[in-house]
Structures are given as C-alpha cells and as structure tokens.
Amino acid sequence: MSSSLEVWIAAALSLMVLSFLWRDNPAYKFAEHLFVGVSAGYWMVMGFWSTLWPNAVVKLVPSAARLTEPAGPVPAREPLVLVPLVLGILMLLRLWPRLSWLARWPTAFAVGTTLGYNLVRYVRSDFLAQIHATVAPGLLVTSGGAVNWVATCNQWLIVAGTASGVVYFTYTRGGAGLRGGVARGGLVVLMVAFGASFAYAVMARVAVLVGRLQFLLGDWLGLV
Amino acid sequence: MTGWWDPAVWNLGVIIAAMAAAILWGIHRARRGSLLRVRRIAGVEAMADAVGRATELGRPVLYVAGVTDLDDVQTIASLGILGAVGRQTARHGCRLVMPTDRSLVLAAAREVLRESYTAAGRPDGYTPDMVTYISDDQFGFAARVDGIIARDRPAACFLQGAFYAESLLVAEAGAQAGAVQVAGTAMSHQLPFLVAACDHVLIGEEFFAAEAYLSGDRDKLGSLRGQDVVKDLALGLVLIGAALVTLAAATGAGWLAVARDGMLRLLQP
C-alpha cells in the first residue's frame, strides 16, 4: 500500500467520483465542488498567464516581459492589441446595467469573425476535401492487370454511402419514392458507421477504466 | 499571393459563389411566397413535447450548448436552437437551467434568452442566473452538469452543440434521471454515444437545420432550400467525378482525361 499522501488523496477522490455510480451522495458532491473550483481557478490563472499577459500586457508594455523572463528578449510594442483589449473591457461592462448594452459589441464581433473565418475553412475541409477524396477510379486493377474486385466494391460502396447520406440530409425535397428509398439507405449507412464508431470508442473508454483500476489496485493498494 | 487576390484558389471562389447564389435564390423564392415544405425531423418535433412534459411535471429544462466556445459554428447553431427552446419555456412558464463552460457563451446565451423571453411576451420571466458559468475544464464542467441533473432532476435535457468525451457522462446522467433527452451535434465520434443514451438525436446536418425548422422564419427556410441545392450540387460532383475518373482510367480517351483533370482541379481543397 502506498505511503504517498498524493496517491491517497487521488485514490480517495477517484472513489468519491466513482460513488456517483451508486447515487448522488455527499462524497460525490465534495469531489464535484472541489473539481469545479480547482479547475475554474486553474483555467483563470492559465487564461491570465498564457493569454492576457503575453498578448496584452507584454505587447503594450514590453518591459513587463522582464518580470517573467529576465534574460529573454524584449518584444516590440504593438498598440493594435488595444482593439481586443477594449473589446474585452466592453465585455465587463455587463456588470453595470446602464452600460451593459455595450457588451453586445464584443459578442457580435466574436460571432461575426467566427462565421467569416470558418466559411472558407469549412468549404475547404468539409466540402471540397470530402468530395475530392470520394472521387476516385471505380475500377481498380492489380499490378498483374486483373480487376481487384474487393477494392473496386469498396470504392463503389464509399460513393453509394456518400451519395445516399447526402440525400438523407436534404429537407425540402419529397421523402417518398426513389429519393425516399435512397434517403433510408443513407440512414442505414449512418447507423452502421455509428455502430462501428461506438464499439471502437467503447474499447478506448475501457482502456481508461483499466488505467484507473491499475492506479487504485497497483499504485494505491499495491495488489497488482 | 499578393494583396487580396490569390489566383491559385480560383476554384474556391467559384464554389463559394455557387453556394451563395443557391442560398440567395432560396431566400428570394421564400420571400416571394413560394410554398416551403420541410420534411419531418423527429428530433426537432420532440423538443416542444419535451418542454411540455417538463411543464406538466413541474420540473426544469436543462440546456447544454456543448463544450466549445463561440469560435465553433456548432455553438452558434446551438444558440439559435436555444432561442427557440427559450421561447417555448417562456410561453409555458417552465424553468430553464443552462450551465456553460465559456464566458463568451454565457454572455451570448443570456442575450439570446433575454430576447426569446421578450419575444414570447414574458420579459419578466427572464433572469440572468438561468445561465451560469461552471468551469472551462471539460470534465469539471461535466461533473457539475451531472450534479445538477442528479439534484434538480430536469424533465427534459437538451444537449445541443459540440461535445467530446464528456458526451456520454452527461447523457447517461440525464437518462438515469428519467429525462426526455434531445441531443444534437455534428461531432461524428460522439454521435453514437448520444444515439445510445438519448431519446432523439439531431444528426449532423439536422442539427444545423433545426433552428430554421423551429423558427418557421421564411428567410431561414429559404436558406435551407438553398442549402439543399448545394447538397444536390455536391451529389452531382461526386457522381460525375467518380464516373469521369473511372471512364478516363478505363478507356484512356484524351478528352475524358482533360475533363477529369478539370474536375479534380475544381475540387482541389
């Protein structure tokens, strides 16, 4: 059995969290509140030192870099960061009811830039790249010149699955007849893909559980 | 590339222009009163029933907008659905609980709900503490959401947005609490978990179409029609492209090779 206080704390918290499998209880509540509090504090500190400090403070007051890296280079001043800084300050005006309407501007800016930036990115990665990958020869031959029927069938299966999936996701067309049949085929393709993905992911989750049990039975209790 | 114009990606301009034209055409048709039929999406129709059930049982509705920030289109789509759910909870006088894991999502969600409650004629029903910030940490957030579900016992859980490994943790807690769960995400790796643990799931594109369906807004429905045209375009490109590549390889004809190369250049990401 471990004599490390850290291991005992980690083991106790693991058991408290696992106790939720039985029901909600004070031990789980304690672990939950501790987890939420510690993680919120951690991310606040991380947000300050990894985002606010290098991107706002150091770029506006370059000499501030000496406080964290005394031997490091002093970067050039970048007054342009005042724009995001002002937007960030506008967010805080939400705390004053009379000025809270100004907090909508940074939110609108974030949403607008997200949509604009992602438009081209998604057209490339989720539209063109997917179609480009699907468009491949539908008759594949081996190096000896014979038709490779397995690879050929795979390719047509990919094309048929993609096409029926796209038909399933159309909304303003009729759901009956040939289109309806193809759409139902697309749903079947989706469900088969989900089943395979589910099984794969469950295996990964089992590996996580095994890791935690190894910690409890090995590092903590020394049984394995 | 110099300046604003990069000739190397002309195909991107053509595709985006075609998409924009299709969507604008759809909106134009909708505004002119063209009849818009949208096929039934079971998950979307279940939303109103779920809110009604929560009202009858006197229990709250839980809404989770995923775990990503406003720089994810799924979060933005989720806020659109939140607006529709908010209008329903406002009309029914049902309590809405929305934990968030990002400060920007918190701010945007409060704005959305404020407008929803005002639009539903119940501005007094809105309170900022409907939406609360928990933690930026993925599993810290999931632990708290599980705790909220266990203690508040919501009758309806809406899990709409981008989820990662915490999806099943949250969905399973909702299933144990006996809540009607309507999930929606475009995260393909999490969809199987949500399908397994939730009553209804908006799969990928359905999730993005839900807001138009729920709002009944003509512009949004017209946009949906335009997007269907884009999907037909994608379907055509896949089928014609596959046929061209196959025939060019099988016959060796020069003109087919030229057509194939042109098609592949158009589709170059």
Image (tube, rainbow, N blue to C red):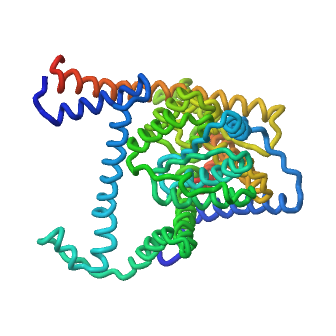
Query: Which is nearer the eye, A203 or A133?
Result: A203
Q: Using the image as rendered, state which of residue A158 and residue B243 is in the foreground.
A: A158
In the image, A6 versus B70, the foreground residue is A6
Q: How many marks?
A: 0
Using the rendered view, name the quadrant where residue A67 is placed.
bottom left
- Above-or-below relation of A169 to B80: above
At 88% from the left and 55% from the top, the residue drawn is B34
At which x and y percent is residue B245? 61, 43
Q: Residue at x 17, y 21 (%)?
A: A221
* Percent coordinates x, y for residue B155 in the rendering: 62, 34
Image position of A184 (left or right of A56) = right
Q: Is residue B250 above or below residue B113?
A: above
Q: Is residue B19 visible?
A: no
- Looking at the image, which residue sits at the far top? A223
Q: Position of residue A32 (x, y in %)?
A: 37, 39
Left or right: B108 with respect to A211? right
Who is closer to the viewer here, A146 or B65? B65
In the rendered structure, the answer to whether residue B88 lies left or right of residue B191 reads right
**For residue A78, side relative to residue B231 (left or right):** left
- Rendered image quadrant of residue A78: bottom left
On screen, B231 above or below A200? below
Residue A224: x percent and y percent? 18, 18
**Can I make out residue A83 in this image?**
yes
- Identify the residue at image location x=71%, y=51%: B87
